Image (cartoon, helix red, strand yellow):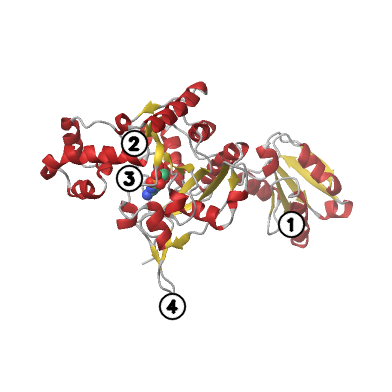
Amino acid sequence: MAIKRPKGTEDLLPDGSPKLTLDVSAQAHARLIDTARRVLERAGAMRLDTPLFEEAELVQRGVGGSTDIVRKEMFTVYYFGDHGGYILRPEGTAGIVRAYLQNGLKQLPTPLKLWLTGPMFRAERQQRGRLRQFHQVDYEAIGSTDPLVDAEAIALMVEVVQALGLRGVRVKLGSIGDPEDREAYNAYLRQTFTPHIDRLSDDSRDRLERNPMRILDSKSEGDQVLMAELGVRPMLEFLGDEARAHFTAVQNHLKAWNVEYDLDPSIVRGLDYYRRTAWELHHEGVGAKSALGGGGRYDGLAEVLGGPAVPGIGWAFGVERLLLALEAEGHTVPANEGPLLYVAALDEEHVAHAATVAMQARAVARAEFAYRALKPAAAFRDAERRNARLVALIGSEEVADGTLSVKNLHTGTQTTVRVADLNALLAAQPDATPTPDQENA
Ligand code: AMP
C-alpha cells in the first residue's frame, strides 16, 4: 500500500491542486505569515529562529511538568548513540527565551521585540484545527514590565487579525495576578472544591492537588456544572494592589486605542512563571474551545530556565486556526496569478534561445518557457492554461532579427519587440508581478 503522511500532519499544497482548501494552501500560509511579518516588523519586532528540537529539560521547565503538553504530548527525538533527551518543540516561547539568554540578547535595546514562525509539535488527538504538526506565529517582548508593553502586544495581535481581513474575532482578557495572589486564590479553590472532590473529573482531582487553578480550564462538563453550582469566584477578585493597577493600566491603553476586549475570568495559566496579563483571541468559525491564539506575561520564565530574572510577555497565533477562521468568513484560496510572460519556440533548434529569453525576463517579472517546440496555436493554448498574459513566439525570422513576436492574451494585440527592449516592456505592464520589495512597499 502506498505510504501516507503521519496522522495529524498536513501537506501544504501548491496552487491548482485538486484538493486545495485555504487551510492547506502553501500560498495562503506564506501570505498569512507575510502579513503578520509586515505588522510585526513595523512595530520593531526582529525575526529570530530557534531549533525545531530542544533539550527535553527546556520543555519540561519552560512549558511545565504538570501540563498536558509535557505529560502526554511530547515527541521525543532519538538518534543513533544519543541519550534521547531531545523534544520536538511544542511552542515557541521557551526556545526564544533560551536563545535570548544564551546569545546575550540582553544587550539589545529594551523591550526587545522578537518574532518567529515555524512548525510546532504536539501529539494531540487530531480534530479540526488540532494537529500534531501545526504552525505558529510567535511574538515576544522581553525585558520590561511596563503595562504599555502588554497593551501593545495585544493590540499587535488585533492588528494582524485586521490586516488579514478577519472580522469576527473577540479578545478575551484576564489577569492571573502575582504569585502571592495566585497562592491565595489556589487556597480558596482548594477550600471550595475539596468538600465536592468526588464530583470532580479524574483530571481535576489531580489538579486540585497540584494546581487547582487549572480546574477552571477543565473541558469536562461535570466540572463545568459543579463550578457553576458553587459560584466559584474569579481570579480577578484576588488581584493584589500592584497587579490590579497593572491590569487597569493595560485596559486603559487598550481603550485609548479602541482595541475592544471582553474581561474573561476563565482565562488561567497554570504555571508559576506566568504573571498578570493573560488573553486569548477567539472566533466563532473555529469553535469556542479552540483559540486562534493566546498570550501572557511570563516574568518568572527566564529564572526557571536558569537565567537571571528577565520579564517578558508574548503571544502565539495558530496559523491553521487563522486560515480556518478566514475560510469561515468566506475567504478562498488566492487566485494563481500566472506568469506575465510565456516564451515558446516554433522550432526545436530555438528552444534553448526561448529559455534564455525567459530567464532574462525574470529580472523583472515572472516568466516561463516551453520545453519543446510548439506551433502557435499550441503555444497560445499552453499559455492560457498557465494563466499567462503575454506570449512571445520565436521562429527563425525573429532569431535573425533579434526580435520576438509578442501577443497580449488579454487584449489580443500582437507586436514585434526587440529582445533588448523586452524587459522594459514587461516592467511597464500595469500588473507586472511585483517583486517582494514592491509588494511590501
Ligand atoms: P498555546 O501555546 O497552547 O497557547 O497555543 C497557541 C495557539 O497555537 C493556539 O491558540 C492555537 O491557535 C495554536 N495551537 C495550539 N495547539 C494546536 C494544535 N494542536 N493544532 C493546531 N493549532 C494549535
Q: Nearer the viewer, mark 2 or mark 1?
A: 2
> Mark on residue 391?
none
Q: Which residue, given by chain and number where applicable, does mark 4 sit on?
A: 81
Query: x%, y% of residue 152?
Result: 52, 33
Q: Which residue, given by chain and number where applicable, does mark 1 sit on?
A: 355
Q: Nearer the viewer, mark 4 or mark 3?
A: 3
Does the rendering let one see residue 158? no
At 49% from the left and 49% from the top, the residue drawn is 17
Q: Mark 2 touching mark 3, by CB under 8 A? A: no
Q: Classify the position of the N terminus by image quarter.
A: bottom left
User: Reading the chain from its start, which is encountered first: label 4 or label 3?
Assistant: 4
Q: Which residue, given by chain and number where applicable, does mark 3 sit on?
A: 270
Element type where label 2 sits in the image: loop
Up-down: is 102 above or below 319?
below
> Mark on residue 267?
2
Mark 3 Cβ inside 8 Å of ligand 1: no
Element type where label 3 sits in the image: loop
Q: Amino acid at mark 2?
A: Ile
Pointer 2 local density, CA inside 10 Å: few below 14, some 14–19, many at least 20 = many
